[in-house]
Amino acid sequence: MGALTVGVLFSVTLAVMIGSVPIPASEVWRIAVFRTFPELGLVTPDWTGITESIVWDVRFPRVLLGAFVGAGLSIVGATLQAMVRNPLADPYVFGITSGASVGAVAVILLGLSVFGVYSLSIAAFVGALVAFGLVFLLAQRDGVMSPVRLILAGVAISYVLSAITSFMVFYAANTGNGGEVRSVLFWLLGGLGGARWIYLTLPALAVLLGTLYLVLQARSLNALVVGEESAAGLGVDPQAFRRQLFVVTALLTGVLVAVSGGIGFVGLMLPHIVRLMVGADHRRVLPVAGLLGAIFLIWADVLARTIVAPSELPIGIITAFVGAPFFIWLLRRRSVGAVGRAA
């Protein structure tokens, strides 16, 4: 935990330094201290206004948003895999990301701006909640929510919502809205280019509060992984606890997808790496997954904005290029079932 915490700080520093205008580490943190505590006079501002704007207004919010999104998606993935006892579970499987995509694409293509700069994020969040509600209702039968029905309902809703998104993109492309279609495709593949300080408060609170809640429930998660009968014997109500987890993970995913777009493989891949490192005890898995997810997405974003500079790749391309080969290797090792066995 200590090493990973240092790794997060190191990654944040380097990520802010790297770009078309290289900036020394000392200057990065001097600007950060100056902008955070201007009234204390701890630092003398001897840099240019352009440098200060690059560091504080552009790179810092982007890097911090990447850290929050990476941490949150990784923690959600670990929780979902334990909740349904399926190592392939992630936010995509449950249709939450597809719901957010429908809301965001509708705003982009229709030009809706009822809530100003927050319109896209709010629409994506509402779409994620609608998808969550549909999956939640379909997964229940006689008041019981089984893991298998949860996954099947999520996959079904995900396909329906993806079809709606594809139809909207197809219709826009055939009516000459090429610019909007390009924006939609970029959003669907994920990106942190729109990061601003005003957008960080909600993701930061969601990740911190969601992580705190899930870590406090780590013992119950461990019991749920062992099996419903064993969990009940340890005093855990599997049905009620699974509903609570589903609500928390859906809300957290909705907030993150609303500000970053569809970033795949983070919630699927990182939990498996963490279990290889620290075992299956969620008291260790969840905080380590958060820190490792933050580091991973920070560097994925660095690659996305530098590998084809001055252009920028959608970050989802980077995570897929890294995640897919790793997962194939993991399958070859037959370690993907470690969610249940190690617990």
Image (cartoon, grey):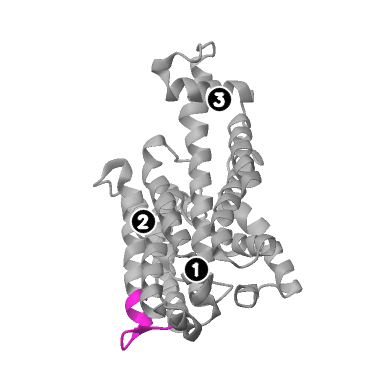
Could you tell which of marks 3 and 2 lies nearer the N-terminus? 3
Image position of 65 with respect to 18: above or below = below
Q: Residue furthest front?
A: 234
- Which quadrant would residue 311 be assigned to in this image? top right
Q: Which residue is mark 3?
A: 29
Q: Is residue 332 left or right of residue 321?
A: right
Q: Which residue is mark 1?
A: 219
Q: Amino acid at mark 3?
A: Trp
Horizontal and vertical percent position of residue 260: 46, 50
Marks 1 and 2 sit apart, C-alpha to C-alpha, by 33 Å
Q: Residues within 10 Å of mark 2 (few under 14, many from 20)?
A: many
Foreground disc of the pair 1, 2: 1
Q: Are marks 3 and 2 in contact (CB under 8 Å)?
A: no
Horizontal and vertical percent position of residue 96: 41, 65
Residue in the image at 35% along x and 75% along y? 136
Mark 2 secondary-structure assignment: helix
- Residues 259 and 246: in front is 246
- State whether residue 141 appears in this view: yes
Could you tell which of marks 3 and 1 lies nearer the N-terminus? 3
Horizontal and vertical percent position of residue 290: 54, 53
Q: Which residue is mark 2?
A: 124
Q: Amino acid at mark 1?
A: Arg
- State whether residue 23 appears in this view: no
Q: Amino acid at mark 2?
A: Ala
Image position of 235 with respect to 320: above or below = below
Q: Which residues are magenta?
A: 135-146
Marks 3 and 2 sit apart, C-alpha to C-alpha, by 34 Å
Horizontal and vertical percent position of residue 191: 51, 47
